[in-house]
Amino acid sequence: MFGLRPVLMTGLEAQGFGTPTPIQARAIPVIMQGRDLLGLAQTGTGKTLAFGLPVMHALLGAGRPEPKTTQALILAPTRELVNQIAETLNSFAQKTPLKVQRVVGGAGIGPQIQKLAKGCDILVATPGRLLDLLDRRALSLNATQMLVLDEADQMLDLGFIHALRKIAALLPKERQTLMFSATMNKQMNEIADAYLDRPERIQVAAPGKPADKIDQSVHFVPQGDKARVLEGYLKQHPDDLALVFSRTKHGAEKLMKLLNGWGIPAGSIHGNKSQGQRERTLQGFREGKIKVLVATDVAARGIDIPDMRHVYNFDLPEVPENYVHRIGRTARAGASGRALAFCAPAEMGDLRAIERLMKITLAVAGGAPWSDELAGPARTAARKRNGGGQRPARHGDSDGHARKPRQKSFGKRQGPAKSGGRDGQRRSA
């Protein structure tokens, strides 16, 4: 299949992979030709293997890495997504000479420096921690042949644009660059224009379209009644795993403690949790010891648990695209799932934005839509509580670094980069 090396084909067979997903079928041949690629696909469609398999295929014939270098760099916005990618690639690298390393914030940097000392074939990293290691001269990118930006739109949303520019300036101009995302906007088009060289664009689902097998609905409920309504839904499926999204770190922690007090085994992950805490909580969730995981958007693109059937949007996201990523945590790999959103009066605008993005109207599971007379004043009051009319600050930066303000524009390419590398410039052909 695709001309992949036999050891990779053996790994696919051993892990039960059969027919490739649409993004895999279209992306892998392009990448194996050495071309740059912009891949657009909804979550849960197999993007990791779409870039991971051809990257590993190329590196199996590339020789061993030098000390403190990596031959391929994969950047992802969150610790959870970095871990998920690294685990997937390591499962295929076990019977090969390839070394896959991961580096994330929130973990000790000393052991990470030691692991990189001998060099690695593939490095999966969050942008902030990678810059820490580059600043300490623990790693050089001058031998990096391939760059992958996974969930690039979320990296921009989390304010990593400056980090990406610094990293790009340290990479060779002649390289293969792959960019994958579930959504596309004006800023994404600008970064693609700056980073990719005559890329092949592949889109296997319309932006904003979730997996087909997700049963979506909305329950209209006052903010103060949401917890008890959630309890009722969770107790209807006591043996199923459920993921609950909260808008803030404080809200996630408070809800987790409340559910535990009601006898529902729950855990939480958010930006205030250490890497060790997050990994232990996720492991408990995978094993079924924890039935409910309460999280901020830090988990919207970094959790892949095939048996999870229920996603609850306890708070609606302010960025409508994040709704698509949240509910994409269920119905993975062709399975079915259920996504239920709770909508308080102040969230009617958020709900309408989500429905416009997806071009659907969510089925009503309970309550009735709030009138404009009630929703408008509630929204105004909520904004005042959260900073004098400004939207509440987004939470969930999982890289251990303060966020930079979002840029209105990535910046147009200005021709060849000057000496010292490029900062956001398109490389020469």
Image: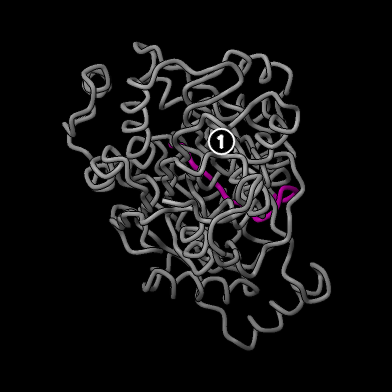
Asked whether residue 235 appears in the rendered view, the answer is no
Indicate the secondary structure of the residue bearing disc 1: helix
Tell whether 69 sits left or right of 337.
right
Count of numbered circles on the image:
1
Q: Quadrant of residue 56?
A: top left
> Does the magenta segment cover residue 248?
yes
Q: Nearer the viewer, residue 425 or 349?
A: 425
| Position of residue 76 measured from the top left corner of the image (x, y, whole percent) | 54, 41
Looking at the picture, the colour scheme in use is one colour
* Residue at left offset 71%, top offset 43%: 253
Q: Nearer the viewer, residue 347 or 222?
A: 347
List the single residue furthest toward the front.
Answer: 419
Quarter of the picture holding the N terminus: top left
Q: Nearer the viewer, residue 46 or 72?
A: 72
Asked whether residue 248 appears in the rendered view, the answer is yes
List the single residue furthest toward the bottom.
Answer: 373
Q: Quadrant of residue 257?
A: top right
Q: Nearer the viewer, residue 344 or 179?
A: 179
| Position of residue 284 measured from the top left corner of the image (x, y, whole percent) | 55, 25
| Position of residue 355 measured from the top left corner of the image (x, y, whole percent) | 44, 72
Tell whether 119 sits left or right of 393.
left
Residue labelled with disc 1 = 80
Residue 12 lies, with reference to residue 407, above or below; the image says: above
* Residue at left offset 35%, top offset 56%: 215
Question: What is the span of residues highlighted in magenta in the rendered image?
Answer: 240-251
Disc 1 residue crowd, few under 14, some 14–19, many 20+, Cα 10 Å: many
Residue 261 lies, with reference to residue 250, above or below; the image says: above
**Residue type, numbered disc 1:** Glu
